[in-house]
Structures are given as structure tokens and as C-alpha cells.
Image: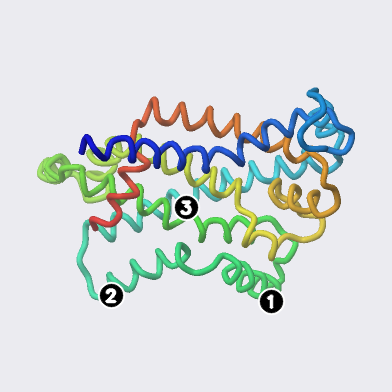
Amino acid sequence: MTRNRPFTITVLTLGLVFLAAPLVFVVINSFNDSSYGAWPPPGFGLRWYRRLFEQDGLLPAALASLWIAALAAAIALAVGTAAAVSLTRFRYPGRGLVDALLMAPLIVPKVAIGLGAFILILKAGGYGQMFPLVGLHVILLIPFAINIIGGALVRIPRVYEQAARDLGAGPVRAFVLATLPQLRTSLGAAFALCFMISFDEVDATVFVVAPNQDTLPVWMYQYMQQYQDPTVAALSTILIALSTLLVVVLVSRARTTIVAGLGGGAAR
């Protein structure tokens, strides 16, 4: 173990550098004072941050992403909690198939899900509306909610819920009174993770958004197709800072709940 320690530290350091290098590049480039984003930067300033807030369509896209992410995360949390209870507390024929179908969005390529959703939404007459887009995000988020909530459920002793049942509470009331409070941290972590995934979703979303229906990632993607300046790097730096702040808050309050929940899903 001691002889392998330098090798382990070297590999770990190289891995961290590999992961952090793109983020460092984006942050540095966002302060590039060049008029066209030359690299390496000839100087540093806030030129691209000022340009960012002059962009038409940025604020509506950001508000749309916030609204879609909040609503989709809330719905996915409700559906995922019910599904996690079903998968962890009950045994019934076809349970494995139900589990596989609910986890399918993790395996099926998002482009295939997006194309299928586009055809379905177009046939149903919902193209250009916001709620079909929320529904698509809910489908993509449900597996993450199930994994986190399911992982927490298998670690919660059922004795409290059984005691509530013995005192006369029905199954739903016993779950709400005895088990749900113990899921509070996991529910918060699941909502935060689902919110961030939905807010960042672009692979499937580009198939179903109408021309006047941008989300923030789609707006960034389209901007990069037209311009190659560091305006998007400035926006990315702001998002990195907000995401880092959210992760710090989550870790300080929930510690390793997200990681434990993801691992616990396999224990069903």
C-alpha cells in the first residue's frame, strides 16, 4: 500500500487536472479582454459579461429553464417517490420489468428519446407548448429520483411505520407520519439533483423546442453556432459559480446523501 501511494496520488492528481482543465479554461476565457476572444488572452476584463447582459432572448430562456426545471423536478420527485416505495416495499409479478422500464431513460440515448418525444408531441398537437417539454424532462429525471429515494428507503427501519400501523394509522398515513420525515434530506437532495439535470438538459430538448421556445442550454448552443466569442464562457462561469454554491450547501446539509442514494438504488 505504501509503495503504491505515490502512484495513486499521481493518478488522482492527473485525473483531477483532466476534469478541472475545461472549467479552468472557460473561467479564464470569460475574462478575456480581446475583441474576438483570442487565446491566450492579451488582457483581462469584464467585456463579455457586459455583452452577456445585452443579449436579447437570454432572460426569457433563463426564466423558461428555471420554470421547467422546478416543475419537472417536483413532478419527478412525486412520481419517483411513489415508484421507489413500490419497488422497495412490495413484491409483485412484473416488478423487474417495471424497474427496467423506469430505469430505461438512463440507458436509451437521449437523442432517441428526444426524437420519439418530438413525433409524439407533434402528433398530439402540443408542439411549441411548454408542458410537453416539462413531460419530457420528467421522463429523463424519474430514474434519478427513484435511485436516491429508493436508496434512502432501504436504509430506513420499517419499525416506526409498523408502530404507526399498530396504533391505528392507515398505510398512507403511517408512511407520511413515520417514514416521510426521515426522507426529508433525501427528498431535498433528489430535488436539487433533478433540478440541475433538467436545467442543463439539451440533448433531447433540442428535438422538441419550437423556434421561439429556447431554454438556456439551447440558447447557448444556438449562440455558439453563430458566434465564437467568449460571451457563452461568461455565462458558463456564472453557472459554474452557482452550481458550486449549490453543491457546497447540499454537501454541508446532506453530506453524502446523493452518492449514497445513487448507490442504494442497486440494493433494491
Q: Where does the image place residue 60, in percent across and percent down from the top left?
A: 77, 42
Residue 138 lies left or right of residue 59; in this view the side is: left
Spatial separation of the CA atoms under disc 2 and disc 1: 30 Å
Which badge, 3 or 2, comes first in the chain's sequence? Answer: 3
When asked about the image quadrant of residue 133, the answer is: bottom right
Sequence-wise, the earlier of marks 2 and 1 is: 2
Residue at (57%, 43%) from the top-left corner? 70
Q: Element at badge 3? A: helix
- Height in image: 177 above or below 96? above
CB atoms at circles 1 and 3 under 8 Å apart? no
Q: Which residue is mark 1?
A: 123
Q: Classify 162 as above or below 268.
A: above
Q: Residues within 10 Å of mark 2 (few under 14, many from 20)?
A: few
Please, is residue 197 above or below residue 6 in the view?
A: below
Are dots 3 and 2 in contact, CB under 8 Å?
A: no
Q: Nearer the viewer, residue 137 or 20?
A: 20
